[in-house]
């Protein structure tokens, strides 16, 4: 039986890597997108070998349409199919509105929102031919409730939700389901460097009194992107420990 293929943007570390690992454990081959020259490609491939997954590592800036197009073509040439797209790549450039630079607003919108557009547009023709596919885009609770100092990030993540709702309606007739996962505070390398006082302050805002894990996000993404999801589309799943 031909294995299914998942393409995960920003899949070499953090939440993206946890998502890739979840799909690998469940028998998928992987296309892992990355952007940093410091990414240890051999180590990542070796790590996923234990699950029997074939891995294609593709460097691309998701905000660049041509680079995304080359990545998708390479994936199709290698595997012949893309069954699941996970739009995970994203950046932050936080600042209060009055201090925010135009380039910082543009950068966040370009990678987070336009990157989601680029990959979704490029992958869906192949899904349409197979009359099946799953698209899961990583939004954020900030895109649902807003947050001071993150107007650019909130705009990009709210945009992903609206984009996904529209795409879900367009693609439903071809059995392509599109959904969002909106994480709250998640324990990653970025949050690990925070001091204990800041972590305590964050945990106090969360009814469950702890940050989520990358694995908890990956579990939800896998459900929405996997074979068990046959009727959920156009939805946003908040994974935030009860914050909103």
Image (cartoon, rainbow, N blue to C red):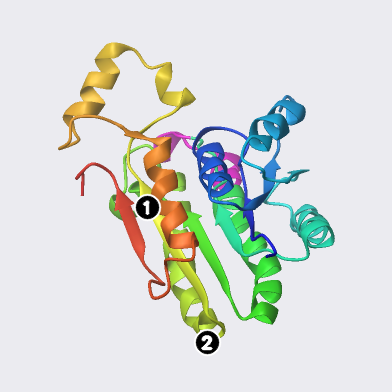
Q: Please provide percent x and percent y for residue 7.
A: 64, 54
Q: Is mark 2 on a helix, strand or loop?
A: helix
- Residue range corresponding to the magenta coloring: 94-108
Callout 2 crowding tier (Cα within 10 Å): few <14, some 14–19, many ≥20: few
At 30% across and 53% down in the image, what residue appears? 238
Q: Which mark is residue 143?
A: 1
Q: Please provide percent x and percent y for residue 10.
A: 61, 42
Mark 2 highlights which residue? 173
Q: Is residue 206 positioned above or below 124 on the image?
A: above
Closer to the camera, 195 or 187?
187
N-terminal label among 1 and 2: 1
At 29% across and 31% down in the image, what residue appears? 211
Comparing labels 1 and 2, the label whose residue is closer to the camera: 2
Looking at the image, the residue that sits furthest to the front is 1
Q: Please provide percent x and percent y for residue 177.
A: 49, 72
Q: Is the C-beta separation of discs 1 and 2 under 8 Å? A: no
Alpha carbon distance from label 1 to label 2:
28 Å
Closer to the camera, 82 or 189?
82
Q: Is residue 109 positioned above or below 210 on the image?
A: below
Q: Is residue 124 positioned above or below 219 on the image?
A: below
User: Quadrant of the rendered structure where residue 118 is?
Assistant: bottom right
Q: Is mark 1 on a helix, strand or loop?
A: helix
Q: Residue 192 carries which label?
A: none
Q: Is residue 243 positioned above or below 225 on the image?
A: above
Left or right, residue 25 beside residue 36? left
Q: Does the segment drawn in magenta span residue 156?
A: no
Q: Please state, as top left, top right, bottom left or bottom right, where the N terminus lies in the image.
A: bottom right
Q: Can residue 37 be seen in this view?
A: no
Left or right, residue 223 beside residue 122? left
At 39% across and 52% down in the image, what residue appears? 220
Q: Please provide percent x and percent y for residue 78.
A: 82, 56
């Amino acid at each position: 039986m031909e294995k299914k293929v998942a393409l995960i943007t920003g899949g070499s570390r953090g939440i993206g890597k946890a998502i890739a690992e979840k799909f690998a454990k469940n028998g998928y081959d992987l296309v892992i997108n990355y952007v940093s020259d410091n990414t240890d490609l051999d180590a990542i491939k070796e790590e996923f070998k234990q699950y029997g997954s074939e891995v294609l590592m593709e460097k691309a800036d998701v905000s660049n349409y041509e680079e995304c197009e080359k990545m998708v073509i390479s994936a199709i040439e290698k595997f012949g199919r893309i069954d699941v797209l996970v739009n995970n790549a994203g950046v932050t450039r936080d600042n209060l509105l009055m201090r925010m630079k135009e380039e910082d607003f543009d950068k966040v919108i370009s990678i987070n929102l336009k990157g989601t557009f680029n990959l979704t547009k490029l992958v869906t023709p192949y899904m349409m031919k197979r009359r099946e596919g799953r698209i899961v885009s990583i939004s954020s609770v900030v895109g649902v409730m807003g947050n001071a100092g993150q107007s650019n990030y909130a705009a990009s993540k709210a945009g992903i939700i609206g984009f996904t709702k529209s795409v879900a309606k367009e693609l439903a007739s071809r059995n392509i389901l599109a959904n969002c996962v909106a994480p709250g505070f998640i324990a990653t390398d970025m949050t690990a460097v925070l001091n204990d006082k800041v972590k305590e302050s964050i945990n106090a805002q969360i009814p469950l009194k702890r940050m989520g894990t990358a694995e908890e996000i990956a579990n939800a993404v896998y459900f929405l992107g996997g074979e068990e999801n046959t009727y959920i589309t156009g939805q946003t799943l908040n994974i935030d420990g009860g914050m909103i």
